[in-house]
Image (tube, rainbow, N blue to C red):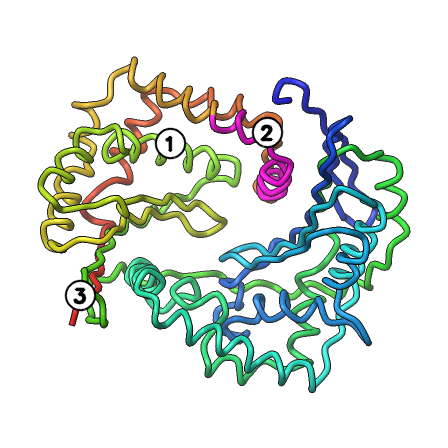
Amino acid sequence: MADKLQKYSKKLPNGYEIEVVPLPGYNQVYGLAMTDFGSVNTRNGELPAGIAHFIEHKLFAKPGYDVSEKFAEYGANSNAYTSYTKTAYLFQTLDKPYENLKVLLDLVQNPHFTEENVASERGIIDQEIQMYLDMPEWVLEQRILGQLYPNDPISQDIAGTSESLQHINKDNLLDTYRQNYRPDNMDLVIVGDVDFKKIENIVGNSNFHEVPELKPIPKQVFEPIGTGGHESMEITQGRSAYGIRINADVSLPELVKLQFELNMIMETLIGEASDNYEKMSNLNIIDDSFSYNVVAENNYCFIIVSGSTNYPEKFQEYLKKHLSFNELKDVLDEKRFERIKRDAIGSYLFAQNSPDAIANQMAELYFYNVDYLRLVSLIDSISYDDVLRVAEQFVTDDNCTYYNILPK
């Protein structure tokens, strides 16, 4: 499938972008509507934490019915998710793709917020928040983000807090919805055996709300990185996280490229095939839970390395010593770099066998001005010298921190 993918796209007069990848003969159809709005977009504290996630939940509620029931009537599975910077709504079906598309458009275009359904949702989401507070992996992620970005929305639960939920009401939900679910702030991707003209006609005749005047977004200012910390929980084994904040002032397409470059650096230094991974395993510093994650989204770019360990101090010391430009120069040669780059391209091509992977990545990349079908060219443009330059500039002691969760 990978070498045959085609994409048809059109931007409607109101700014709404439609992207369709036809897969003739493929049984499954995957549809996704995404908005460039997530948990961090609280306008520097003007909005309550968790409001993006709250909107995601309540858009399914319509007068007299729930949208998930409509999807089920047409044989589709439906879901939604909120990330730090995006919110997405999706369906997956083997039948009636055009009917399900209409349901998806109804879902994102027709909010129904009332005092009653907002009040009932507070309790449901608060239970969700309390559940996560007992999960050490979740607590560790929030704490290391709090060290990387002190007092920033990214360090809070995507669902908000028990306190912030009390400040969410039908009025600020509707105002926030209208500001951020604007046609020019959204992308629609359909992947499967569908007709582009039919998709275009359905979307063009759907019920877009009147777009209000866009409020100016306050400039985001980050505080200095925290010095690290720890706390205790009722667990049998400690967990440790090491974070690196990347302060990169680059264009959106360059941010996508930077994420690939940082992944290449981390894979070289601490990937499962690296000498450091083997050494840390032999020293019993890490176990199979050890992993790293590179995030590059809008204003945020960071790396988190984490895992269970009985030796949190050794965990931190080892990473601080070996995640360095000098070590990368010693272990990364041109041959190894080309192999890692081919692996990155191979992963992209392999994902093209999955309609949901195509749709999710295509929608994300739209907001970074990168064409999904040209991603191979972007990865292939990365040079050995580019990776060394990025490591020298960003992988330093000045922008790292840590957090440990210890057994009581």
Q: Earlier in the sequence, mark 1 or mark 2?
A: 1
Circle 2 — which element?
A: loop
Residue wearing tag 3:
406
**Which numbered mark, 3 or 1, is in the foreground of this view?**
3
> Considering depth in this image, is 260 or 66 the residue closer to the camera?
66
Label 1, residues with CA under 10 Å away: few <14, some 14-19, many ≥20: many
Residue wearing tag 1:
261
Q: Earlier in the sequence, mark 2 or mark 3?
A: 2
The stretch in magenta equals: 347-366
Q: Amino acid at mark 2?
A: Gln
Residue wearing tag 2:
352
Label 3, residues with CA under 10 Å away: few <14, some 14-19, many ≥20: many
Q: Amino acid at mark 3?
A: Leu
Q: Are marks 1 and 2 in contact (CB under 8 Å)?
A: no
| Residue occupying image coordinates x 76% and y 31% | 8
How far apart are the alpha carbons under marks 3 and 1?
33 Å
> Considering depth in this image, is 152 or 260 the residue closer to the camera?
260
Q: Amino acid at mark 1?
A: Glu
How far apart are the alpha carbons under marks 1 and 2?
21 Å
| Residue occupying image coordinates x 84% and y 48% | 203
Q: What is the x, y in percent for residue 163? A: 46, 83
| Residue occupying image coordinates x 26% and y 44% | 288
